[in-house]
Each structure stands twice: as C-alpha cells, then as structure tokens.
Amino acid sequence: MNKKIMLSTSMIATAAIMFSLSSAGWTTQDSVYEKQGNSQKVQLGPRPFFLINDMDAGWLKKKLSSCENGPFHRTDFSIGHRGAALQFPEHTVESYRAAAKMGAGIVECDVTFTQDKELVCRHSQCDLHTTTNILETDLAQKCTVPFQPAVFDENGKLIKEATAQCCTSDITLSEFKSLKGKMDASVPSATTVEEYMKGTPNWRTDLYASRGTLVTHKESIALFKKLGVKMTPELKSPSVTMPFHGFSQQDYAQKMIDEYKDAGISAAKVWPQSFDIKDVQYWITHEPEFGKQAVYLDGRYEDASFNHRKPETWKPTMEQLAKDGVKIIAPPIWMLLEIENGKIVPSLYAEKAKQAGLNIITWTLERSGPLASGGGFYYQTLNGENPYPTHSSKSHINNDGDMMNVLHVLAKDVGILGIFSDWPATVTYYANCMNLK
C-alpha cells in the first residue's frame, strides 16, 4: 500500500477517535497531562483526609497527617480500577478522567468484544443490563435474556427475582456507542424496567451517572495517552462460546495487544492482565515485550481445591509461574494478609510469591463501602470471616480509617508494586506521603 495513503488513513482514524472523545466532553486542555506526566499536580478532594482523621491514634496516623499540605503528584502505585468507580459509572470517559485527576498513574480498561468483534471497555461481556441504560432503549429486544419482572405470591412474598442479561456480543459497535453508562446496580424485586435500573448502594452515588460516555478499547488508549496515564487492560473471559464466528481466544488476545501497537504505545506503558493463565502465557510467547509486564490475576480462590494458606494446593506453584516467565501476580487484598499476635502481617502466600521472584499487584481498595461492619470480601482474613484456623476470629477492621493501615502493610511489608482502587485519591495521598513512585 502507498505510504501516503497509509498515513492518511491513520490520521483519519485518529481524528475520528478524537472527535468521539471531544463529543463526550473531553477537551484539548487534557493534553496538559501528557506534557507534564507525573509532575502534574492532582486534586484529591476531602476523602483521604476523612480517612486519616478516622484512624486510630498512632505513628501512622501522625505521619499521614503531616502530609496534608502536599504537594501531591501522579503515581503508578495508584491504579484506577475501572476509572473511579466509587462515584462514577465504571469504564466511562467521565470515570477515567476522574481517576487521572486524582493521581492514578495507571488506569484500567476491562476489554470485551461486540457482535462485530470490536473491542470495548466493560467489566463483563454480559453486564450491560446493570451498567448501562440498554433496557430502556430499543436495543433491549436484542438482549440474550430480555427483562422479566419479579414475581410475588398472593401474600406479597418474592418468589422469583427480576432477571435480564444483555451482552456486548448481542449488539454491534455502533449500537454499543449509542448507550449511556450508569452505576452498576439493579433491584432484584423490580416489576418494571425503571425500577430494575435503580439499586445504587447508598454509599455510592448517582450524582455523576446522568451521562456516562461509553468507550471502545481504541478510544480508551487515545484518552489515556492524552491524560498522560499508563494503561492496564484486562482481557475478560468471554461469555459466548469461543471461537465466536471464527474469532478465537488467541485472536482476541492478539487483537488487544495490536491496538496498542497500532496506536504507537510503548509496551513499557502497558500491563495486560487476565485471570486465564493461558492468555498470559500467550503474551509471553507471542508478544514478549508486552509479556514482560503481563499480570496473572489470581482467582483460584474460586476453586474448592485451592487454599491460599496451603502451598501444596497451588497449581501452578509460585516457582512454576516464575519459571514460565510470569513476572507479576495479582491476588485480592485478603490473600496477602493475616492477623498474627494482634497485628496485620504478610500472609504465607505473599511471602512465597516474593521468594519466587514474583512482583505483586493487588485489588481492590475503596470497593467495600463503610468498614464499620468489617468490609466483607476484600478484608475477609482480617475481619473474622476467613481467619487463620488457629487464631482468633475477632475483626481487626472496624472503621474506615483501617484501610490506611491495610494499605501501609501492603506497601511496606508485602512490598506490592501498586493497588487498584475505586477511588484513586486515597492511594495517591498515601503514596505521595510515603515517597512511593
């Protein structure tokens, strides 16, 4: 092909993406981030200060309080989980911009695909019914499972919850782009679509949910580049049978990487992720530059035969992962921590990962709501839900400020590279105060 024609086509494609982002409220003023990079001052808002004030008295609270006047800068230790999903509709332009404003040095696009095999940013291939307005549009008739209202008996007792399942693979790219993002929620007892689309937890908000702008994977790359942030795409497990109309799992994994290469993004600025070790191994073998920073998301806790406290149940072992070229492992927070003699300490899992030479990233801070009741899933080894068998089941998580103690142990004792957060400002504050990059 004529080089001039190739350049022209590339310029047209880039212009189209920029026009799309501009229409969504993105402006050229955001390019200041790209020029200033991590030196760009950020806006944290009041939440980090609220959390520090809520901490129990001690050295760490005093240290963090001493940093209240900043300055605060962007840091790769702070990773925007789906953007800033605590208060913004996840995987939208608005959520991504908020994460960058709060100092996230790396921002996540969960990657899935549409009916016409185009890559888009969604946490799941089949979550459109809870994360977008699809049910109130004409596209609802294309959903895998159309909305069915809840059923009650003659006494008003709920006997069948409301259901729906709408997938990106149900619709084309252009149809996907016509949707608007909302906070991820639904009402199981709903009898109407309008009621079903509500349900946002009271510790989140719908304040910014009126115009969530959905993005393609390509658009996320262009936006992140302009914002000056690095990128961590997660290849989501398909909900459809693969290959999908000739589109294989390997095609899918390769297409995601190709879109970074086509955009001229250095592999050093990309951390591709997957819960499927086969995806990680594919990148290590076929895209070794990107494979160097490929992240194995460890979801083996869902396997009944796996026990994060018993190395003999780990298949593959930490040593085997390292031997196979895996450099970074990413379990949930709770797998990295235990309570010992009344203190939060690194778990055996964390110690074994480090001994094998693996780096660690973890998830997810600011996703549990108020911590007065223990914080649920992400704090389960610390709140009595999943205690060490011979230790007390007493909860060591009882106020919101405790997440700063957890963060400190993860950073200083476990030695994580970074942490995903639904509100990056919290991590950005800590990282700057502790002089983490």
Image (cartoon, rainbow, N blue to C red):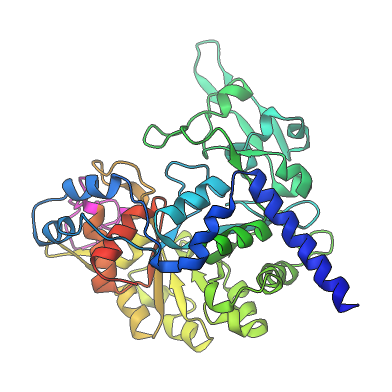
Q: Nearer the viewer, residue 205 or 103?
A: 103
Outermost residue, left direction? 58
- Which image quadrant for residue 140? top right
**How far across and how far down the image is residue 300, in percent?**
47, 65
Q: Is residue 369 above or below residue 233?
A: above
- In the figure, is residue 139 to the left or right of 302? right
**How far across and how far down the image is residue 91, in percent?**
56, 50
Outermost residue, right direction? 1
Q: Nearer the viewer, residue 78 or 389?
A: 78
Q: Residue at x 41, y 37 (%)?
A: 204
Q: Is residue 155 above or below residue 48?
A: above
Q: Nearer the viewer, residue 6 or 345?
A: 6
- Which quadrant is home to the C terminus? bottom left
- Which quadrant is home to the N terminus? bottom right
- In the figure, is residue 38 to the left or right of 254? left
- Which image quadrant for residue 79? bottom left
Q: Which residues are magenta?
A: 379-402
Q: Residue at x 66, y 57 (%)?
A: 219
Q: Main secondary structure of the magenta part?
A: loop
- Taking the magenta stretch, the answer to whether it contains residue 389 is yes
**How far across and how far down the image is residue 255, in percent?**
72, 68
- In the figure, is residue 267 to the left or right of 414? right
